[in-house]
Amino acid sequence: MNSVSSNPPGFGRRRVGRHSVGRRSSGRRSAAGSDRGVLLRWSSGLFVLIGALLLILGSCGSQSGPPSPGSDAAGSIGEPSVAASSSAAPSSPPLSAGDDPATDTPGNSPSAKPSSTGQPGNTASSKPAGSTPVASKPASSTVANKPATGATAPSKPRTSIVLPSFDTPPIKGPVLSASPPVSIAIPAINVQSPTQKLGLMKDGTIEVPPLEDTNATGWYTGSPAPGALGPSVILGHVDSAKNGPSVFYSLGTLKPGDEVSVNRGDGSVAVFKVDGVRQYGKDNFPTEVVYGNLNYAGLRLITCGGTFDPKSGHYESNIIAFASLVSSH
């Protein structure tokens, strides 16, 4: 007697068929999951690529520069006095409105051109101080004919001219005799720097401290010596692409009241107090405020700042610290 299967004929095959169908469905689900994984990976890669492109584009745009002075650093800076002694004014202002005072551009060192115009207290058409204007001769028609008998002779033309007088503002604060600077110290920003002399180059541009010397400052010899009457000008680099931050990188963090000491060639030390720190766009450089005549011993510390533009290779602004002499020892 044949044994009888406990399952109806074909049931096993149907069960196998179901299992087979189940395996095929699982395969489709696995394939779909794999496709989704690949899509997610591609999407993630695309987002990473877009982010990298944005970073690259951002690096090609403007970059933030060194610290800028805050509103609490503006202080009160002395305005120039055009009536002050002309000997206090720099012989030739080294900067025009758009120039770079210390050429503090990473990897570049173009020099700032002196401005032939806007020199404090002088104009191209003005005569030297103390010169006497020459009176013009009377017109020939006034002397061609003698007056008729009995007529009143015409009065002679005046040959003297009364010159206006200007009051010279009294000198404020201590003033030292001229002596070139040797070094400068600014404790608030950890500056202790040798100071060299900066003149004008053959092309009329101002010399600058060596870019590779990150601790060098320079005194523009066309300005008064620090401590003497007038605005003394000292320049310093802010940074460079090769060497990083330079001596005046933190100039914008100075505050009114901070001390600046300048060691001078005669052995004396001129002590200044910061009056204020300002930032100016290079297209609006305050030539008169920086280089104008003063009735006190002033100091201007100048560097670059603001935003660095890689396209032009220059910072877009200047940072200037204004200071006044308070003592010496």
Image (cartoon, rainbow, N blue to C red):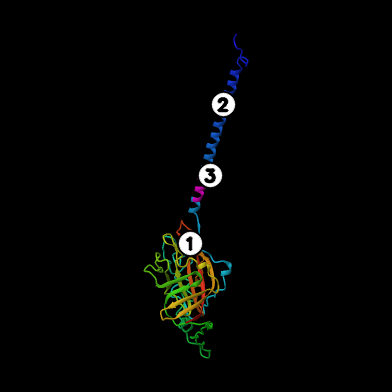
Corner quadrant of residue 79: bottom right
**Is residue 62 inside the magenta stretch?**
no
- Residue with the mark numbered 2: 23
Q: In the displayed structure, does residue 17 sit left or right of residue 302?
A: right
Amino acid found under the numbered disc labelled 1: Tyr
Circle 1 packing at 10 Å, graded few (<14), some (14-19), many (20+), is many
Query: Looking at the image, which residue sits at the far left?
Result: 202
Between residues 250 and 104, which one lies in front from this camera angle?
A: 250
Q: Is residue 300 positioned above or below 33 on the image?
A: below
Q: Is residue 309 positioned above or below 116 on the image?
A: above
Asked whether residue 73 is in view, the answer is: yes
- Rounded to the nearest angstrom, the CA distance separating label 3 from label 2 is 36 Å
Amino acid found under the numbered disc labelled 2: Arg
Circle 3 packing at 10 Å, graded few (<14), some (14-19), many (20+), is few
What span is in magenta?
Answer: 46-55
Which is nearer the N-term, disc 3 or disc 2?
Answer: 2
| Foreground: disc 3 or disc 2 | 2
- Indicate the secondary structure of the residue bearing disc 2: helix
- Residue with the mark numbered 3: 47
Image x and y of residue 212, in percent: 39, 64
Query: Residue, x 60% and y 19% (percent of image)?
Result: 14
Q: Are marks 1 and 2 in contact (CB under 8 Å)?
A: no
- Residue with the mark numbered 1: 315
Image x and y of residue 304, in percent: 48, 65
Query: Looking at the image, which residue sits at the far front?
Result: 1
